[in-house]
Each structure stands twice: as C-alpha cells, then as structure tokens.
Amino acid sequence: MQNIEQQTIETNTDFEVRSLDAICVNESHLEHKWYHNLKYVAVGIAFGIVFVKAEIISWFRIQEMFRLQSFHMYGVIGSAVIVGMISVFLIKIFNVKTIYGETIEFHPKAFNKGQIYGGLLFGLGWAITGACPGPLFAQIGSGASVIIITLLSATLGTWVYGYIREKLPH
Amino acid sequence: MNIIEIIKQPWPWYIAGPLIGLTVPTLLLIGNKSFGISSSLRHVCAACIPANIPFFKYDWKKEIWNLFFVSGIFFGGMIAAYLLANPNQVIVHPTLAIELEKYGITDFSGLVPVQLFNWSNVLTLKGFLMLVVGGFMVGFGTRYAGGCTSGHAIMGLSTLQWPSLVATCCFMLGGFIMANFILPFILSL
C-alpha cells in the first residue's frame, strides 16, 4: 500500500512539475556530460552583463518604472518580448531543431489562481527589493554583497511555498 | 569616443531589450531549454533541503542547466561591474531624486541604494522589511505564480500564453501598489 502511494506521489510530482511549472522546465530528453552545461554559463554571463549595463538590476530604474517616470524598463521588457515572440514564431514555422537535432518543444501553461495571488505578492516584493530573481544574482555579482540575504530569503520563501502549497488556493 | 568608452556608458533599452529577447531562442536552440530564472530557487531547495515535501521531490539534476545559467548571471554581473563599469553616477529621474531625498537617500553611486541595502541595516526594521521580507515575497510569490519576469513576462508572452499575461499584469499591479502606496511608509521608518 505504502509502496503504491509512494509511487503515485513520485509520478504525480513529475506531472505537477510540468503542469504548474511548464515554464523553466528542461524539455530535452538527451543526456549529456556535465561540461555541456558550460554553454549555459556563457549565456548567463552575456545576460548578466546586459542586466548590469542597461541598469535593469538598478533599484532606481524599478522605482521609476512603477512611478511611470521612465520608459526605460517598459522599452526593455517590451522589445525583449517582441524579439522573443518573433524568434519563437520562426522556430515554429521553420521547425528549427536544436544543435543536437532535437525538435524544440513548447508546453502550454495551465491557468491557476496562483498566477494572480502569487503574481501580486511577487509584484509587491519586486518593488521593495528592486529585483526579480535574475537581477538578485547579478546584483550580488556586481558587488552588492548584502543582497545575499535577499537571495537566501527568497530561497526560504520558495521552500515555505512548497511546504504549505497544498493549503493554498490554486 | 572609443568603443570601450561607449560600452561603459549605460546601454539604451533598444539594445538591451532585443539582447534579452534573444536569450529565448538561444536557450531553445542550444538545448531545448525554456527561459526562466526563479525555478533555480526551487532546484536549490530540491537539492539542499527537500525535507520529503512532494513539491521538491523531482529529479533536480535534470534541471541543473538552470543553476549553471544563474551562476553565469552572477559572473556576468561581476564582469560588467568591475571591467565595464559606468564611470558616472546612476542618472535618477529628478522627481524620484527629490522624493528619495526626503527619506535620506542621496547616494546614487551604486545600482542599489547603498544607504538602504547594506550589512549594518539588515537588523533594523526598515532593512529587515526591505531585504528579508521583500526577498521572501519574491521567492514565495514567483513560485506561487509559477514563474517570474523572465519565465512569465518574457518566455510566457513570447509563446503567447494567456496565463502568463495574467501573471505579468499582477506583477505590475503589485509593484504599482507597493511603490506608490506602501513603500513610502517603509522608507520613512
């Protein structure tokens, strides 16, 4: 009995990873040696440099965005979305494969109320810290060592969410 | 101005935005990966403190690329700040500068206001709210929403997912409420 239960939890967890977190999930079915992951470090470095140089990780830029005092962040996010959209469109119509020859997969994201409650909560936190999760890493790298506290607290927040998840409305 | 000096200036949105947008196809093409960052925190929980919680019982090693990616963001931040640093102060909108001055924030030399975010402030009420409580809301909220600005606003909208549009609107609404109505009280503590 317990064995079956255990198994259900495990398979079900995988299902939930996909249904609630279709975004940010590794779609590749291939297995590679660890050093293949170094290419993600390279993309991350480029990304982190853009974050700092365009001041996206600046607390001041985020405050200006939420006070409608500057177009900068809207321009960044808007043009990023447009470029992303065109890229995804091109990948889909030309059925572009990965460098390993795999078909690129997209998983539709299911709606749940968490996107509203969680979204609002994240928005509140974003305006206080001036950072979403990505910029936290770049801020620490750029020398704001105290942001380690914010990152640890964000990790704790993620953990507490996992802990009380069953009791939350979704 | 030579090229290095130009790179050291703050980059305009029409350079930075498209570069960020290109991260989406880059990650897809080099390994079928969906762009997203907040999941890295979940993988850290799953790897370090799973505590038998079903939400953290999955094969995090399969997602380890995400941790390599965020470590790259850390190094990128370091390279940009130490090798390509802007020699001038961060330019702040005059209205914001006047408002912040009321709360004693006058130092605009860093990307984060050093008068708020520093180690000696961690245990003051204001510092605790901004660093610890703020961070907690970011971590809890992104996971509850199933993604952050990258996963929902950029990747989600790029793939035309309407739930991501709902999430993005809620991020913005939460931010507007905090910045305009709640943060002034926190800053005046």
Image (spheres, rainbow, N blue to C red):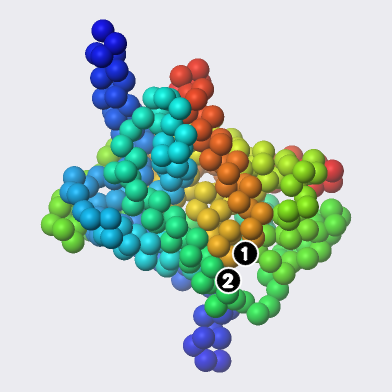
Q: Residue at x 52, y 49 (%)?
A: A133
Q: Residue at x 34, y 56 (%)?
A: B24
> What kind of element bears circle 2?
helix
Q: Is residue A22 above or below residue A50?
A: above
Q: Along the line of sight, which residue is nearer the eye, B29 or B177? A: B29
Q: Is residue B73 above or below residue A118?
A: below
| Amino acid type, mark 2 | Ala
Specify the quadrant of the image occupied by residue A42. Answer: bottom left
Q: Residue at x 68, y 78 (%)?
A: B88
Q: Residue at x 62, y 64 (%)?
A: A143
Task: Estimate the spatial distance between the alpha carbons at disc 1 and disc 2, rounded to whole Å.
Answer: 8 Å
Q: Position of residue A64 (x, y in %)?
A: 66, 57
Q: Along the line of sight, which residue is nearer the eye, B156 or A46? A: A46
Q: Position of residue A45 (x, y in %)?
A: 43, 66
> Which image quadrant: the N terminus of chain B?
bottom right
> Which image quadrant: the C terminus of chain B?
top right
Please give the residue where the numbered disc 2 appears in the rendered image. B81
Q: Chain of mark 2?
A: B
Q: Chain of mark 1?
A: A
Please give the residue where the numbered disc 1 appears in the rendered image. A143
Q: Is residue B1 above or below residue A116?
A: below
| Amino acid type, mark 1 | Gly
Q: Is residue B97 above or below residue A124?
A: below
Q: Residues within 10 Å of mark 2 (few under 14, many from 20)?
A: many
